[in-house]
Image (cartoon, helix red, strand yellow):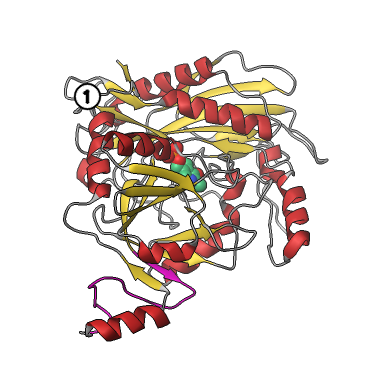
Amino acid sequence: MISTRILGRANLGITPSRSNLGSQVGATGCGRYTSQAASSLQLACDVPSFSAHEDEEYADVDWDKLGFGLVPTDYMYVMKCAKGSAFERGGISPYGNIELSPSAGVLNYGQVIMTWKFAGSDALKMAHCWDFGWKQGLFEGLKAHRTENGSLLLFQPEQNAIRMRYGAERMCMPSPTVDQFLNAVKQTALANKRGVPPPGRGSLYIRPLLVGSGPILGLGPSPEYTFLIYASPVRNYFKARTAPLNLYVEDEFDRASRGGTGGIKTISNYAPVLKALTRAKERGFSDVLYLDSVGRRNIEEVSSCNIFMLKGNVLSTPATKGTILSGVTRRSILELSRDLGYEVEERAIPVEELLEADEVFCTGTAVVVASVGSITYQDRRCVRGVFMRNLGLLDEFSLHSYIKRWKHRVEFRTGGRMACRELYDALVGIQTGEMEDKHGWVMEID
Ligand SMILES: *Cc1c(COP(=O)(O)O)cnc(C)c1O
């Protein structure tokens, strides 16, 4: 006998954080998942949550235990609009599950299984047409910091608004205006103020989403769109904030293709490379560095952050040409580097050039500025400079020939006076209100 449980309604109850990167939509059960953008994919039923004492200044969270997992806050912001019209009015509501039709655009076409096994021009053509599919989902990420005087600081939120509009245009979706976006972000941050960690102990990560929520069966733009913002207090993205990252250079899977959507923050850019990320993590690496899909020669970016290298006084980062996400942090770091007297270059960087770098680091809202300790390419290891951890002592000659033969794992300077440290301090100083904001990047709300 087959027994079928009929649910009361046809819609699925989905927590906003579960659909955020498109598609880790699970069955009911454990109410909370750690953020998928974070470095862990495991279920987290035991994450701390808020107490019901709404009148208190702070939520009942152990701020010292914060990582980058989801700690649901009190409220979320929701605004909807029909295809062909504009977003008009939204509002704050208690944080909770949302209802979606089983045929919602984002569920049906939000996650496309992509394989990149073909080569040459076919690969390009395929990539092109796959990327023009209706994967209608965009996300953003920004942080609010609490100052000593109790106000909240947002960092360049208008840049996120502009980026969402740009992405929406590419994905054939209506999007909130910059003012609507800013207003919604402010309301969400203030409504969840209890969830903003004390100064110096983290920040409130704000996650705006724009998804095709209306029902659709044939391939086409969704008839309804939902703009939603939720938030979670966070601290460090990688487990040990100061431990240098060990990156693995991916040379099987591509993250983005020419003419594709790598340059916009669409949810569909992430699921296809989860395999590469999971594989690298299983092998003990912190994250994956992706190469350009055409020649697999130039470095592009890391799963959720941009990459920089320092050689002498010159700081270089790959130029964004549609395949690299143009990070707000990346742009800020470029400006701060100029302020600090570095020469700055945006250009193509062949992966071998990393071998010559003095320093390598990653930047992004979540990771801030994270130093890279080693890079492994084509599964072989090589050391640079005097790091002899894997080798024992070598004389200068054999070190030299070792580098020549095994150009595949590079280790970088990670101590002493580091550009990465200097830039971290300058950026976080501005974001937290402890340093003067000469560029007018910070928006104070209270
Ligand atoms: C969000 C993101 C970044 C960093 O952008 P920020 O605006 O600095 O947070 C970099 N790469 C990818 C793929 C991203 O999704």
Provide the secondary structure element on which disc 1 rests.
loop
Q: Taking 66 as reference, is 309 above or below it?
A: below
Query: For the stretch drawn in magenta, what is the main secondary structure?
Result: loop
Name the image quarter holding residue 345.
top left
Q: Is residue 376 visible?
A: yes
Q: Quadrant of the N terminus?
A: bottom right
What residue span does the magenta drawing correspond to? 374-392
Q: In the drawing, does residue 157 fall left or right of residue 118?
A: left
Q: Taking 172 as reference, is 383 above or below it?
A: below
- Nearest the viewer among 356 and 286 is 356
Q: Position of residue 440 (x, y in %)?
A: 33, 20
Q: Taking 408 as reference, is 245 above or below it?
A: above
Q: Position of residue 215 (x, y in %)?
A: 74, 34
Residue occupying the point 28% across, 30% down = 431
- Nearest the viewer among 156 and 406 is 406
Q: In the drawing, does residue 360 fall left or right of residue 148?
A: right
Q: Position of residue 341 (x, y in %)?
A: 27, 39
Residue occupying the point 25% across, 34% down = 197
Q: In the drawing, does residue 109 fall left or right of residue 398?
A: right
- Nearest the viewer among 268 and 48 is 268
Callout 1: 10 Å neighbours few (<14), some, many (20+)?
few
What number of labels is visible?
1
Q: Which residue is mark 1?
A: 436
Type of the residue with mark 1:
Glu
Q: Quadrant of the C terminus?
A: top left
Residue occupying the point 72% across, 66% down = 119
Residue 386 sits inside the magenta stretch: yes
Q: Taking 432 as reference, is 383 above or below it?
A: below
- Nearest the viewer among 407 and 77 is 407
Q: Is residue 34 visible?
A: no
Residue occupying the point 73% across, 56% down = 124
